[in-house]
Image (cartoon, grey):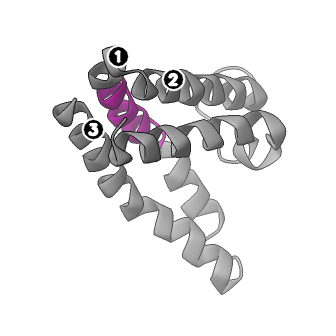
Amino acid sequence: MTRQALGLATLLGASGVLHFARPRPYDSIVPRSLPGKPRTWTYVSGAAELAVAAAVACPRTRRRGGLAAAALFAGVFPANVKMAVDWRKAAPARRAVAFGRLPLQIPLVLWARKVAKDS
């Protein structure tokens, strides 16, 4: 496995595990417009991250996994926007985290596309 693919699979896998081990922070950033309970969406997104991590880790599915990772990073962007809006009056460190996550999605999407392209 390339370093790029290993790094991406590790990031997605760790994030997926955190969705199950510590779901509360993720619950709080689920957009209210989604139907159902936030915890359900937390678990669904965690499972998606674990599945995509596995796809990226496997050479046979790496290209599709990279594309799925790019889509996943774009798909969770509304949660990052919600976090930034909710934390706009929080302490400076929390605001920095919330607003810092917004532009971070761009290099994550590009990284995932590079893994797909290189596979």
In the rendered view, would you say 68 is above or below 103? above
Please state the horizontal and vertical placement of residue 17, each as a whole percent of the image.
Answer: 71, 36
Is there a contact, CB below 8 Å, between mark 3 and mark 1?
no
Circle 1 SS class = helix
**Looking at the picture, which amino acid does disc 2 mark?**
Ala
Measuring 67% from the left and 74% from the top, which residue is drawn there? 94
Q: Quadrant of residue 63?
A: top left
Residue stretch in magenta:
65-77
Is there a contact, CB below 8 Å, between mark 1 and mark 2?
yes
Of marks 3 and 1, which one's residue comes earlier in the chain?
A: 1
Q: Which residue is mark 1?
A: 61
Measuring 37% from the left and 48% from the top, which residue is drawn there? 3
Measuring 34% from the left and 47% from the top, which residue is drawn there? 4
Q: Which residue is mark 3?
A: 115
Give the total number of marks visible in the rendering.
Answer: 3
**Looking at the picture, which amino acid does disc 3 mark?**
Val
| Magenta segment includes 70 | yes
Disc 3 to disc 1, how far (Cα)?
11 Å
**Looking at the picture, which amino acid does disc 1 mark?**
Thr
